[in-house]
Amino acid sequence: MNKFKYQMVIQWSEEDNCFLVGFPDFPGQQWRTHGTTYEEAVTQGIEVLESLVMAYEISGEPLPKPSIVCTVV
């Protein structure tokens, strides 16, 4: 897989008692996966990102442009 620079947001959820993982650059649901530990959430997030990129490539749909969080000047 190509090394894309997409944001992965990981946030603790008291309600779900786990870390939720989302990708703001990809339209659709806010949270795409989760993990009971931060490390598990990162691993799950990487797998989901790889799957998202593959799905876009298979469908021929252009990938969303990665957003820039901040610019260093």
Image: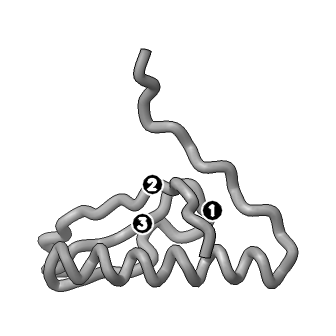
Secondary element at image label 2:
loop
Residue to which mark 3 is pinned: 22
Quick check: 58 left or right of 51?
right
Residue to which mark 2 is pinned: 7
> In which quarter of the view is residue 64 placed?
bottom right
Give how far apart the Cα atoms at labels 1 and 2 are: 13 Å
Quick check: 53 left or right of 73?
right
Give the amino acid at mark 2.
Gln
Quick check: 1 left or right of 60?
left
Q: Residue at x 68, y 81 (%)?
A: 54
Image coords of residue 47 (percent x, y): 45, 83
> In which quarter of the view is residue 13 placed?
bottom left
Mark 3 or 2, closer to the camera: 2
Q: Residue at x 18, y 79 (%)?
A: 18
In this orientation, which residue lies closer to the viewer: 36 or 71?
Answer: 71
Give how far apart the Cα atoms at labels 3 and 2 are: 8 Å
Image coords of residue 7 (percent x, y): 45, 54
For the residue carrying disc 1, how many other residues have a C-alpha within 10 Å: few (<14), some (14-19), or many (20+)?
few
Residue to which mark 1 is pinned: 27
- The quarter of the rendered structure image containing the C terminus is top left
Q: Residue furthest right?
A: 60
Label 3 or label 1, whichever comes before in sequence order: 3
